[in-house]
Image: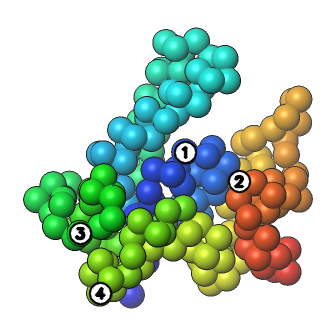
Amino acid sequence: MGVFTALLDTNVLWPSLLRDFLLSLAVEGLYRPVWSEAILEELEDCEVTKLTRRGVEPAEARARAAHLIEQMRTHFDDALVIGWEGLDGTYGLPDPDDEHVLAAAVLGGAGVIVTWNTKDFPDACLPVGIRALRPPTFLYDTVSLDPRGAIRAVDEIAARSGVHGRPRTREELFDMLADRYRLHDVVACLRDAG
């Protein structure tokens, strides 16, 4: 049996910690992420905007955003869906700008589109076998299948992130995930398993 595939929309990749959690779960083998060149371009633009709003010089922001995209390409070298352009505009989604997301999900073999904007992907427009899920639902479903693997992912994030020269703790990350992204059920599942 193959690994479950999920397309990650730009809006779930833009927040740094949520992106780190989603991608760390993929590294642990809990699912396979896919995205399109259009999603990566949107993410790069969003990252530049976010960094410059935080006071990073524009050239540095562009360099850091480009580095992020390069890291994603390198570590997930099978995630890029190509050839979706022919399906763009064929699904009748409420927002035509979201058609590329669904087209990439179809060609990428995704069973789920992970997005905060599920209303933009109504069930009536989705091909059979594809659902649009918000991160709390997708992550709960994913984490509950392998809570130990998910805890390893959180511990890896803790080891490489820190504040004032010290690594974050698992509990700090749990609190941040719950508070920032409404992942209360996910965190409860992880705490029960830990």
Q: Residues within 10 Å of mark 2 (few under 14, many from 20)?
A: some
165 to 158, vertically: above or below: above
The quadrant in which residue 24 appears is bottom right
| Residue for point 57% across, 74% down | 138
SS for dot 2: helix
Q: Which residue is mark 1?
A: 14
Q: Residues within 10 Å of mark 4 (few under 14, many from 20)?
A: few
CA separation, marks 1 and 4?
28 Å
| Residue for point 85% across, 80% down | 192
Q: Which residue is mark 4?
A: 128
Which marked residue is nearer to the observer: mark 1 or mark 3? Answer: 3
Q: Are marks 3 and 2 in contact (CB under 8 Å)?
A: no
For residue 92, the mark is 3
Amino acid on which disc 3 is placed: Gly
Q: Is residue 140 left or right of residue 26?
A: right
- N-term mark: 2 or 1: 1
Amino acid on which disc 4 is placed: Val
Percent x, y of residue 74: 40, 43
Amino acid on which disc 2 is placed: Glu
SS for dot 4: loop
| Residue for point 50% across, 27% down | 48
193 or 54, which is in the foreground?
54
Q: Residues within 10 Å of mark 3 (few under 14, many from 20)?
A: some
CA separation, marks 4 and 2?
36 Å
Q: Residue furthest front?
A: 94
